[in-house]
Amino acid sequence: MVNTIGVIGLGVMGRNIALNMANNGEQVAVYNYTRDLTDQLMEKLDGQTLIPYYELETFVQSLAVPRKVFIMVTAGTATDSVIQSLIPLLQQGDIIMDGGNSHYQDTERRYDELKPHGIGYLGVGVSGGEVGALTGPSIMPGGDLHFYNEVAPILTKIAAKADGEACCTYIGPKGAGHFVKMVHNGIEYADMQLIAEAYTFLRGNLSLSVEEIADIFETWNEGELKSYLIEITAEILRKKDNVTGLPLVDVILDQAGQKGTGKWTSLQAIDNGIPTSIITEALFARYLSALKEERIQAQPILAGPAKNTQSLDKAEWIEYVRQALYMGKICAYAQGFTQYKMTSEINNWNLPLKDIALIFRNGCIIRAEFLNVISEAYDEKADLANLLIAPYFADKTARYQQSLRNIVCEGIQSGVALPCFSSSLAYYDSYRTGASNANILQAQRDYFGAHTYKRNDMEGTFHTEW
Ligand code: 6PG
């Protein structure tokens, strides 16, 4: 039996990727470390054909040469152990693709380990969750281009499509694909948190009901904010709890989980001097949310502002929230794409920023109308320093910045934390400041540590006896 591709790891993502491949005409061998998942999958097949194997060796032997193995197992040691067991079974020219949320530096290490064996290793970022994996995810493959070319026909077939184009493109060498996926998740954190803050304002400051907010999100989803995350938030808000009949969101515990990719995004940015404050603020918002017990204890102890009696015109303020959300989104994506640009320069990756925006248009969690304008901004100027200064966004922020200020001020006055809205405004105002306050920092550093400073009116390095 000659199978065209093999999938290892039959958890929900792996299973759906395998089915997606089968639905697209591939003859797919499947293998899972424990046989129960394989059996469950085979029982549930609905007209599709997957070829199950219970021994890794026979699974590998069943594959057409060069063998193409797609692994979708938990990132970390599980991925390492699958790769180690594959090495003796594969030959030079065979290709392993890791579709999990692996840390891009692990991908680089694995790439280096497999290189002497002549085995191709592609770190393949896959976004779209469970449904996307089955119906078409956004795919971000990195590694050697000639190995990518071998698997490109399969990956582009199973990817989502936007305007008829596959949401899959070669990203760059070694860990570049997983890096792009990692930062995608950081952007996802910021986008989600901004939406949560818009909800907080609409519910708390404008006293709107959950139903009314669902209507607002639905309306927003017909305009420039159109995106998967806005769409699902409207649906989430409509959902009622079976037990209490309340909106389900009202009974969901306000403690955010996270699997680590957002944290990795912030750590990498910090390590490399990349300002991604909004993404990191979104991560910290999750961490603060996790301190539920402490927050409950602090509530009666810590004072807030005097009761705000100002009554806001609802229609006017709903529009401020919409503009603030769009403005926050621009700032968050500007940070994520800056992280791509700066890291690309550090590693000589030559990341295709325009194409990255294009493959995010469909399939992935952050898919949005908005990505069309981002790709156009890079189309106009491939080496754009920051999305904020692209003409389209400069014009948009000029018109929307006042709304963000209104919302942040009102949040501050009413004692409602809007960390990502506030952080977006601080980023915007800091980025548009030709003269920052870092002169004071430099003077302080020179004062206490003789760290020296530069002057803006002459060349050289200076120290003052303060
Ligand atoms: C995707 C998602 C996916 C997953 C994250 C969520 O693009 O399909 O980003 O990768 O939902 O693991 O991450 P957290 O658990 O950290 O929120």
Image (tube, helix red, strand yellow):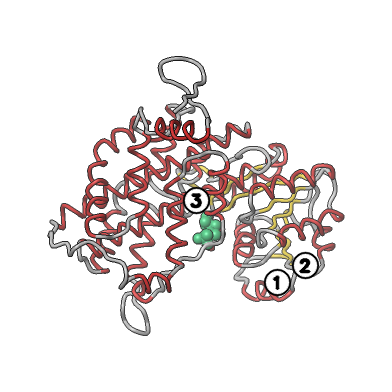
* Residue furthest out toward the top: 458
Disc 1 is placed on an element classified as helix
Percent x, y of residue 347 = 63, 34
Residue 128 in sight here: no
For marks 2 and 3, give the CA distance.
37 Å
Name the foreground residue: 117 vs 321. 321
* Residue furthest out toward the right: 88
Task: Kindly indicate the quadrant of the structure image that contains residue 387.
Answer: top left
Q: Nearer the N terminus, badge 2 or badge 3?
A: 2
Q: Which residue is mark 1?
A: 38
Q: Nearer the N terminus, badge 3 or badge 1?
A: 1
Q: Which mark is residue 53?
A: 2
Please rate how many residues cluster around mark 3, counting C-alpha atoms within 10 Å: few if below 14, some from 14 to 19, many from 20.
Answer: many
Horizontal arrangement in the rendering, residue 254 relative to residue 316 (left or right): right
For marks 2 and 1, give the CA distance.
8 Å
Please rate how many residues cluster around mark 1, counting C-alpha atoms within 10 Å: few if below 14, some from 14 to 19, many from 20.
Answer: many
Mark 2 vs 1: CB contact within 8 A: yes
Mark 2 vs 3: CB contact within 8 A: no
Task: Kindly indicate the quadrant of the structure image that contains residue 52.
Answer: bottom right
| Mark 2 or mark 3, whichever is nearer to me | 3
The structure residue drawn at horizontal position 32% and vertical position 55%, both measured from the top left corner, is 418
Percent x, y of residue 14 = 64, 62
| Mark 3 or mark 1, whichever is nearer to me | 3
The structure residue drawn at horizontal position 46% and vertical position 55%, both measured from the top left corner, is 189
Name the foreground residue: 219 vs 320. 320
Percent x, y of residue 6 = 73, 58
